[in-house]
Image: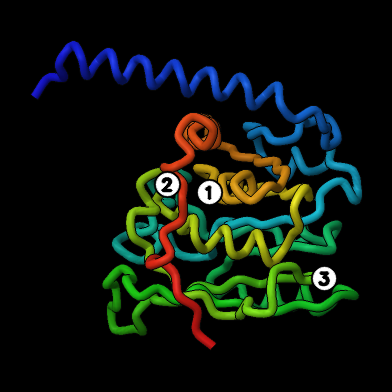
Amino acid sequence: MPLSDQEMRRLGAYDEIIEAAMEQEERRCKRMIGPYPCCTVVQGDCLELMKAIPDGAVDAVITDPPYEFVASGGGLGAKRGYEKHYGALTNGFDVAMFSRFPNWMAFCSKNQLLKLMTAAEKSAGRWMLLTWNKPDPTPLCNGNYLPDTEYIVHRFDKLYGGYDERARFTVMIGGTREFHPTAKPLALMERLVRVASDVEQIILDPFCGSGTTLVAAKKLGRHFLGFEISPEYCEIARRRLAEIDAQPSLFEPKPEQMTLEA
């Protein structure tokens, strides 16, 4: 059914609000992270962009990098949507990209666990294996275990947040993949941001996708920088960040979406 003139005017006004919020955000934060303005999303290859970040310029790296999997056929890789949006990725990412950062947190598949845990173990600091447990996983067993758990390796010197922070997170997937085929729930990313950083610190997400980590950081009073190779997802991330100012209620967490297990 075609939209009425009134509905079209409302959509036009909303777009104007978002555009104004995006411009306001770009002017608000005056910090620089190397050559990059803070609190922005930069389009490009993160491996190249990260070379320009000075040592000690960011306080935490929190990211959901490409998983190692076979992205052809009807397997998990195809279902996750990587093949459509990024091509047939099978080699994950270069773990060495974290070596300059004392505080990093990365999602991974079981195929990448050994690499990430080895990298964390070889560092001088502490590390922990966290799990995200999904009550509503994609029903793709194919003769194997249900894919209801994803892994997060956290290398750190200091933890933030309260004593009630746990190593297991149970969060509904819900509608989180409206923006990106592998997007993580905002409630989950907010919890990870609280554990890995303090207010006013700077968070880097080198694989920011549709910007959920950045949205969580902004909501919780952190500064941030996102890198994303896809121009389409860069624009989505920028608009989501602008919407926090335009309509804050859109991003209010729902307590019933998240519970903790010991």
- The residue tagged 1 is 212
Q: CA distance from mark 1 to mark 3?
A: 23 Å
Q: Disc 3 residue type?
A: Lys
Q: Earlier in the sequence, mark 1 or mark 3?
A: 3
Q: Which mark is residue 180?
A: 2
The percent position of residue 134, horizontal first and vertical second, equals 40, 73
All told, the count of numbered labels is 3
- Would residue 214 appear left or right of 90 to someone viewing this image? right
Q: Amino acid at mark 1?
A: Thr
The answer to which quarter of the image holds residue 171 is bottom left
Percent x, y of residue 79: 33, 59
Percent coordinates x, y for residue 149 in the rendering = 45, 76
Callout 1 crowding tier (Cα within 10 Å): few <14, some 14–19, many ≥20: many
Q: Are marks 1 and 2 in contact (CB under 8 Å)?
A: yes
Compute the Cα span from label 1 to label 2. Answer: 10 Å
Q: Position of residue 214 (x, y in %)?
A: 60, 45
Q: Work out whether residue 232 can be spotted.
A: no
Residue occupied by mark 3: 158
Q: Residue at x 55, y 56 (%)?
A: 66
Near mark 3 (Cα within 10 A), the count class, few <14, some 14-19 or many ≥20, is few
Instruction: Give the residue type that dot 2 points to.
Output: His
The numbered dot on residue 234 is: none
Looking at the picture, does residue 17 appear above or below residue 44? above
- Determine whether the residue tagged by mark 1 lies in a helix, strand or loop: helix
For the N terminus, the image quarter is: top left
Circle 3/circle 2 CB separation < 8 Å: no
Q: Are marks 1 and 3 in contact (CB under 8 Å)?
A: no
- Residue at screen point 44% across, 55% down: 182
Q: Earlier in the sequence, mark 1 or mark 2?
A: 2
Check the image and name the residue furthest to the bottom.
262
